[in-house]
Amino acid sequence: MGHYEDIYWEIMEQVKEKGIEKEFQAQLDKMKFQQKHKYKEVRDKWSYAYDKVLKNLDNGRKFN
């Protein structure tokens, strides 16, 4: 596997392990309409979404 595939695999494994699939997908969906994410590569979007979900969960925030 190449480096890019490793990133996707690692993020999905962590998302599944932590049971945050719903929150992760909600963050990705939210980012679709945000201008600052418009030209980011998929791997960068996934990394950002994963980090954002973890940060929000650590701060006790809930997702809609």
Image (cartoon, helix red, strand yellow):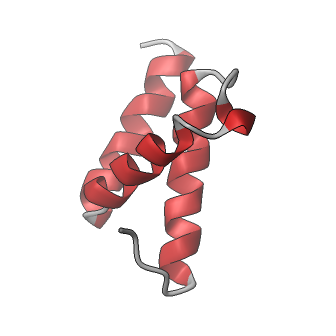
Question: Position of 35 compared to 53: left or right?
Answer: right
Q: Quadrant of the N terminus?
A: top left
Q: Is residue 17 above or below residue 64?
A: above
Q: Quadrant of residue 37?
A: top right
Q: How many marks?
A: 0
Residue lying at the far bottom of the rendered structure: 60
Indicate the position of residue 42 as horizontal and vertical percent values: 54, 24
What is the x, y in percent for residue 48?
A: 61, 46
Up the image or down, 37 lies above or below 17; here it is: above
**Does residue 51 appear left or right of residue 7 in this picture?**
right
Picture quadrant where residue 18 is located: bottom left
Residue visible at 58% across and 56% down?
Answer: 51
Residue 54 location (% of width, % of height): 51, 67
> Where's residue 24, x and y in %?
39, 52
Q: Is residue 4 above or below residue 20?
A: above
Question: Looking at this rendering, what residue extends furthest in the top direction?
Answer: 2
Q: Quadrant of the C terminus?
A: bottom left
28 in relation to 63, above or below? above
* Residue shown at 56% from the left, 28% from the top: 43
Left or right of 28, for residue 37: right
What residue lies at 25% left-to-right and 53% top-to-bottom? 16
Q: Residue at x 55, y 42 (%)?
A: 31
